[in-house]
Image (cartoon, rainbow, N blue to C red):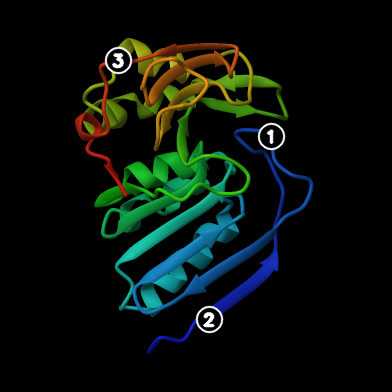
């Protein structure tokens, strides 16, 4: 792109999200010489198609940056996983649910120091909630083999618990970029059944043990 920035904007389709979503949002996909920015959206099939198209068209891109992505449509992230594995991934602010799964497929994963105005940089891994049927689906449990391989320091029991909580929201496995300031220790990994009231720190787990770089 020779230093120029291209912006693609289009309405966000709101469907069945893994977690609660805003009533309306805008999509902004920006390109510069080496990064594709995906910001303030939900991961929907339409977003996945546009991200894939941008990556195919712009060969100079080597990094995908997710900024404040709070979830997405069940299965939409699966469209991008194989493609994302060829790129480094950066995260700023929230990267929850579908976004977290995509980030973990990245060739390298970096959590950026700068927090987003909406909250600290963090990944949230949780199960699949069907808002139509109003129940959890066992589909999320199919991620356990991949997550166990990718996050070796997290036990299978913690992964199964995180993917099986009985209600949507900020519940699951949370990985913060910086120690969560509300806790007395320096932990960055928490298993939460109801955030922030009921969270158990995984004090011995560090970013390096999860193959995550912090910047």
Tag 3 and tag 2, C-beta contact below 8 Å: no
Please provide percent x and percent y for residue 88.
29, 57
Is tag 1's residue or tag 3's residue first in the polypeptide sequence?
A: 1
Residue drawn at the location 38% of the way across and 26% of the way down: 188
User: Dot 3 surroundings within 10 Å: few (below 14), some, or many (20 or more)?
Assistant: some
Residue 193, label in figure:
none
Residue drawn at the location 64% of the way across and 28% of the way down: 130
What residue is disc 1 on? 20
Residue 6, label in figure:
2
Q: Total label count?
A: 3
Is tag 1's residue or tag 2's residue first in the polypeptide sequence?
A: 2
Q: In the structure shown, which secondary structural element does the residue marked by tag 1 occupy?
A: loop
What residue is disc 3 on? 156
Q: Nearer the viewer, residue 34 or 134?
A: 34
Q: In the structure shown, which secondary structural element does the residue marked by tag 2 occupy?
A: strand
Left or right of residue 136: residue 90: left
Q: Residue 74 sits in which quadrant?
A: top right
Q: Residue 134 sits in which quadrant?
A: top right
CA separation, marks 1 and 3?
26 Å
Q: In the structure shown, which secondary structural element does the residue marked by tag 3 occupy?
A: helix
Residue 163, relative to residue 38: is it above or below? Answer: above
């Amino acid at each position: 792109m020779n230093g120029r920035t291209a912006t693609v904007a289009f309405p966000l389709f709101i469907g069945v999200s893994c977690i609660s979503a805003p009533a309306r949002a805008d999509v902004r996909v920006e390109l510069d010489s080496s990064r594709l920015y995906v910001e303030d959206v939900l991961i929907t099939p339409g977003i996945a198609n546009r991200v894939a198209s941008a990556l195919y068209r712009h060969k100079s891109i080597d990094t995908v940056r997710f900024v404040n992505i709070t979830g997405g449509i069940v299965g939409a992230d699966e469209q991008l996983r194989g493609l994302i594995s060829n790129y480094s991934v950066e995260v700023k602010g929230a990267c929850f649910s579908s976004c977290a799964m995509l980030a973990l497929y990245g060739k390298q994963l970096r959590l950026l120091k700068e927090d987003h105005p909406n909250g600290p940089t963090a990944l949230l891994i949780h199960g699949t909630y069907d808002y139509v049927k109003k129940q959890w689906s066992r589909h999320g449990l199919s991620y356990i083999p991949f997550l166990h391989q990718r996050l070796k320091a997290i036990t299978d029991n913690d992964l199964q618990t995180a993917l099986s909580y009985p209600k949507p929201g900020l519940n699951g496995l949370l990985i913060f970029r910086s120690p969560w300031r509300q806790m007395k220790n320096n932990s960055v990994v928490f298993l939460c059944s109801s955030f922030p009231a009921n969270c158990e720190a995984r004090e011995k787990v560090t970013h390096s043990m999860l193959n995550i770089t912090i910047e």
